[in-house]
Image: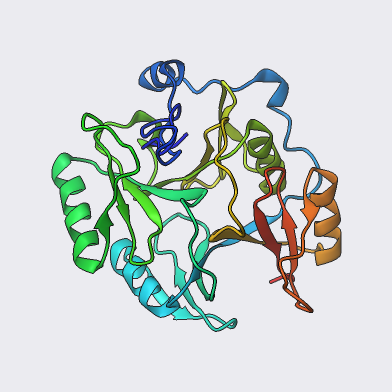
């Protein structure tokens, strides 16, 4: 459901490709008309207690500082040190969450289940973004995109895929530079995250879903089946924090009640709790901030 369709039925890329732009003809037509279909039975799916807050999107990184410098240069966000030995980027726009780069010794296996779709207001701006990314250390990659597709697929210095979307994408028209976090995922997982974060559905059709914070910022999209096989722990994951006046245990219990499960990734004795969403994607619930 992205703008680039690294998948095959959302807004712009394909199925064996990157699962970000798999817009079906129905979705594309709806977007062209400015229509965002929402399944009526799901409009009230969010009511399930006080929602968690999306604190950060985390990248496992071989070299956290180097990767942070790449994304800081591309996004224009400032960096600061992370208490877990990594680096944090602080948003300078309405994104609403920070980006954390945390050290890992695990190798990247296969394509990530989520990636950024970066927007463009003109072909010139798209070309400038691509050129800037390449100067900073990105490279072009081939994930099966077709020559006639207007988005550009790149990988950052550690191989994390992202797309630079061509101008005129109506679905991302009212979004900022980070238009979407495009994910491989089921309709069920879209409903789960809508309830978990309290973000309303802005797209729900043909098993493709998208949500967006009431405060704006990027959309989070899921392309529906078929899902890519999961190969080990995800390279990217969410960090959540409990809402104000709610403790960590109560927040974890609420997330478990709406479909999360506990998982052991070898974290040992830590202050955060590791859970997985209905598609098996790991995420962390931190202590209140």
Q: How is the image coloured?
A: rainbow
User: Which residue corresponds to the image point at 53% horizontal and 76% vertical from the top-left?
Assistant: 105
Res 44 quadrant in image:
top right
- Residue 247 visible within the image: no
Of residue 89 and residue 281, the one placed in the foreground of this image is 281
Of residue 117 and residue 168, the one placed in the foreground of this image is 117
- Residue 117 visible within the image: yes
Where's residue 249, x and y in %? 85, 64
User: Which residue corresponds to the image point at 25% horizontal and 38% vertical from the top-left?
Assistant: 166
Left or right: 155 in relation to 253:
left
Left or right: 141 in relation to 244:
left
User: Which residue corresponds to the image point at 30% horizontal and 36% vertical from the top-left?
Assistant: 145
Of residue 93 and residue 67, the one placed in the foreground of this image is 67
Where's residue 206, x and y in %? 56, 20
Where's residue 70, x and y in %? 32, 69
Rendered view: 209 above or below 239: above
The C terminus sits in image quarter:
bottom right
């Amino acid at each position: 459901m992205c703008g680039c369709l690294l998948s095959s039925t959302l807004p712009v890329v394909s199925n064996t490709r990157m699962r970000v732009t798999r817009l079906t003809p129905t979705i594309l037509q709806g977007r062209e008309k400015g229509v965002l279909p929402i399944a009526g039975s799901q409009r009230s799916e969010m009511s399930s207690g006080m929602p968690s807050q999306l604190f950060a999107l985390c990248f496992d990184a071989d070299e956290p500082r180097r990767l942070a410098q790449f994304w800081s240069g591309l996004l224009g966000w400032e960096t600061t040190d992370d208490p877990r030995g990594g680096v944090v980027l602080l948003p300078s726009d309405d994104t609403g969450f920070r980006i954390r780069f945390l050290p890992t010794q695990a190798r990247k296996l296969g394509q990530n289940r989520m990636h950024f779709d970066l927007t463009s207001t003109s072909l010139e701006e798209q070309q400038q973004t691509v050129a800037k990314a390449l100067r900073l250390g990105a490279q072009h990659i081939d994930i099966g995109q077709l020559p006639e597709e207007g988005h550009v697929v790149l990988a950052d210095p550690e191989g994390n895929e992202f797309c630079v979307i061509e101008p005129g994408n109506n679905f991302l028209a009212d979004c900022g530079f980070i238009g979407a976090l495009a994910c491989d995922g089921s309709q069920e997982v879209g409903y789960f995250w809508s309830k978990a974060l309290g973000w309303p559905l802005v797209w729900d059709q043909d098993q493709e879903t998208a949500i967006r914070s009431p405060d704006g910022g990027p959309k989070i999209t899921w392309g529906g089946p078929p899902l890519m096989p999961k190969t080990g722990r995800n390279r990217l994951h969410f960090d959540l924090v409990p809402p104000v006046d709610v403790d960590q245990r109560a927040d974890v219990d609420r997330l478990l009640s709406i479909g999360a499960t506990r998982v052991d990734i070898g974290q040992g004795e830590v202050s955060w709790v590791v859970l997985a969403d209905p598609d098996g994607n790991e995420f962390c619930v931190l202590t209140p901030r």
